[in-house]
Image (cartoon, grey):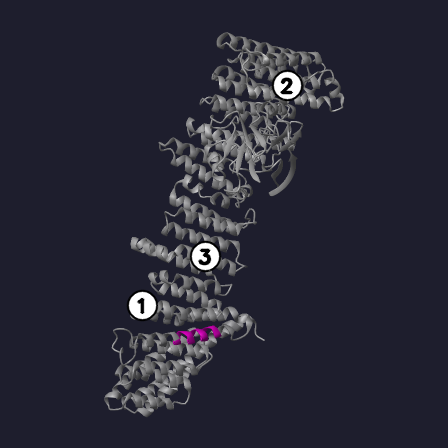
Amino acid sequence: MVLVLALGDLHIPHRAADLPAKFKSMLVPGKIQHILSPGNLCIKEIHDYLKSLCGDVHITRGEYDDDSRYPETKQLTIGAFKLGICHGHQVIPWGDLDSLAMLQRQLDVDILITGHTHQFKAYKHEGGVIINPGSATGAYSSITYDVNPSFVLMDIDGLRVVVYVYELVDGEVKVDKIDFKKTQGPQ
Amino acid sequence: MQAPEQEAVTSAEEQEKWLADAMALVQHHAFYMHRALDANNIRDVLKFSAQMLSELRTSKLSPQKYYELYMRTFDELRQLEVFFREEGKRGRTNADIYELVQHAGNILPRLYLLCTVGSVYIKSKEAPAKDVLKDLVEMSRGVQHPIRGLFLRSYLSQISRDKLPDVGSPYEGEGGNVMDAVEFVLQNFTEMNKLWVRMQHQGPVRDKEKREKERSELRDLVGKNLHVLSQLEGVDLEMYRDVVLPRVLEQVVNCKDELAQYYLMDCIIQVFPDDFHLQTLETLLGACPQLQPTVDIKTVMSQLMERLSKYAAASPDVLYEFQQVDAFSKFSQSVVEVIEAQPDMPLVGAVSLHVSLLTFVLRVYVDRLDYVDLVLGACVKKLEGKGKVKDSKATKQLVALLSAPLEKYKDVVVVLKLSNYARVMEHLDYETNKVMAVVLIQSVLSNSTMITVDEEDFQEEQNLVARLVHMLVNDDPEQMFQILTTARKHFAQGGPRRLQYTLPPLVFEALKLVRSLQAQDLPEEGEGSGSVSLKKVFQFLHQTVEALAMIPAAELSLRLYLQCAEAAGDCGLEPVAYEFFTQAFVLYEEEISDSKAQVTALQLIIGTLQRTRVFGVENRDTLTHKATGYSAKLLKKPDQCRAVYACSHLFWVEDSGTTDGERVLLCLKRALRIANAAQQMSSATRGTSGPMTLFVEILNKYLYYFEKGTMIQSTVIQGLLELIVTDMQSESTTHDPEVDAFLASTVRYIQFQKQKGDSIAERYASIQVQ
């Protein structure tokens, strides 16, 4: 069992002061094996904070990120899964699942982690799964009204991935889970 | 039945009368006693002195009045003492006199006489001091009436003061040692305290307040014993720690009396030296949670911490002692225990305890930020679940808690780095929170007018200010707008370097304000000239982003203009939205020249424009035309290609009905042409025509629109597909496994769509794939 944390669009300090306290107390160092972030952290302090939680951190560039060295896209393999990360402001129309599916085909990944809309989504299609962990701080978005802070934790076990989404609703943390199974492809 | 008012007056009058009567009688008997003294008639001396002392047997007098009587008698007893001493010279032993006085009829006069003789007895060294003292302190048990007993024992204490077998005293050795002295004083103290406590339970319940007042008047009689103990030379740290303190605390705890406990704890703290307290901290603090719940223990502990802070300030050696005994953990542990032991303690009490502890830490452990943070954390724990504190007294204490480190360190950055600082602030109500945030911001601005040399520090500091802005929230839009305009005025004074950190948070808070105004469905213009309106907020936004653009900060400002444009569009304000787009485009044209920056800026422009529904045909056309123009002029061909096919989405907006298949097709074809041109350029310069990535991307776009509308024939798809496959197999094409994978997954997609069995599958039917 491999735990992968996906969170992004924090927009600290422009749109939020910090992660919600309840999230911070849940994110304990040493428990997570990988962190994938679609971007818009935006400052080094947050990068350092993520590194303190887990040594293996992968970040792609959001349009507000201070660090211009983050790549536009990233691909990596965890267990039996190929994962891709891209912030999503590059994919027009924003939040359009068909267009994101095209990016997923281009990166040739089973799971695409993307952001920008600040709205949690887990979308399964014939090519794989698209996951948007939403905004971990509930930051303002021109695309989504009433953003609740959210992030995603994936448990990768063999050919199965369980996606836990944590959302802060009215001060309480609500958890939901979605199961995905990968069929052995003709690779 | 007399009215209560009259009763009280009569009581004071009565007291005066009784006292006067008693004094007169004392005078009367004393006269005869003096005559007997002059005549050296010991029998008569004893007879008249006993009669005089009998006046002290009264129960009618209040403590104050009794005291006056006592003092009068005390003066007479001094004469008596002189006489007894003279008797010694006349050959009578003190042992004899000691024996003689015991014939007095009533116990109280008997004991006063015994004490008086005892004084001389000890001084003569005829008997060991310790024996006489022991005898006297035990016999005094015979008087159990509180007031009479207290004064008697007080007399005993007074006359024995200079006769205790202390280290270095003339009574040491045969007469005993300091242990005996301590034992004597402790016993006297214990008995006096018991008597004092008993007063609480005498008389009717309605007189409770009166009794407590009377008790207060007598408290120093009890406390004096502790003072005596502190003055004994022989009471060193060891004796204090092993004997004195445990015994005293035992009595304090066991007496279970609120008045006594509070007074005596305070007494102990005041009377014994600071280094004793430091070394017995655990014992002393250990008693605190055992006290009655109504005891104002926080004041006691604050006193102790106050004293010890002053002690710490005295010298650096002392600080080392503090480390050794780990004073901090003992205190913080004790605070926890006390709060637990007093569940009815109001919030203001608990917080002020933490304030005292924090003050102590700031004085004694000024470098230990971790301690400061721990104290804040303990307070946060206490506040958990309480939300915003409503009690104004408790809030005041919270503000004191937050201000103390600020005043001490004068460095907001240091203070805000304390992880628990912001968490305490969360419990302040909106008003107070705002005040605190402003205090903090002002502190940063004022302290950083000095040149910050280190760039990293400067950034950190400014980021902190930015984060603070998000704490300045207020539910009332009017107030919120005020906050924003005020904050911007403050920030303008910070200079251009700071604006790029401090203005963006204001912009986003203003955008949030727009949302809340939208939700309220207000008219565009406010009701009066003073009230906030959407127009006013957008004006504020425009001015703010403009200020940012002038720094210059082109890329950031462009993003913010686009945010504002989208927000204005959502409000239906077409001209405002158009203006924001215009500003963004101007920035793009004039200020953004870096290729990479242009690519991203254009993605944002196209993305925003694609989502904006507010424009009429004319405006929309103008902006779209501009956007596609920029796309075609990007430097690198691949960038051009991608931007152009992205623009296709500008012509296909399903939910507002503006779908223009022709223009979409034009974009895609243009993209293809650019891709071809790119290939040719690559062939000409590198010898190979480069990877087919762009073509596969364009193919995917064709598929997207193929499924949505009828402007694309399946033959076109087929043609493009075959072209790609052929070209990829050609030798002049750069082989790229990523493109292979992309094509493969695209093909899989087509196959999947074909077998779905719906209307889309029908359209795909004629497309052949391997």
Whether residue A167 is visible here, answered yes or no, is: yes
Identify the disc placed on residue B333.
3
In screen coordinates, is B156 left or right of B562?
A: left
Q: Position of residue B603 (x, y in %)?
A: 56, 20
Identify the disc placed on residue B236.
1
Which structural element holds mark 1? loop
Q: Position of residue A158 (x, y in %)?
A: 60, 37
Q: Quadrant of residue B185?
A: bottom left
User: Mark 2 or mark 1: which is in front?
Assistant: 2
Label 2 neighbour load within 10 Å: few <14, some 14-19, many 20+? many
First to last magenta residue range? B187-198
Q: Is residue B561 above or below residue B491?
A: above
- Is the residue under label 1 in contact with that under label 3 (CB below 8 Å)? no
Q: Is residue B696 above or below residue B217?
A: above
Which structural element holds mark 2? helix
Which residue is at a point 53% across and 75% down the rendered structure image?
Answer: B203
Q: Position of residue B218 (x, y in %)?
A: 42, 71
Q: Specify the principal SS of the magenta part.
A: helix
N-terminal label among 2 and 1: 1
Residue beneath label 2, please?
B700
**Identity, as a three-letter code, of the amino acid under mark 3:** Gln
Which residue is at a point 48% across and 65% down the rendered structure image?
Answer: B291
User: Mark 2 or mark 3: which is in front?
Assistant: 2
Does B591 appear in magenta?
no
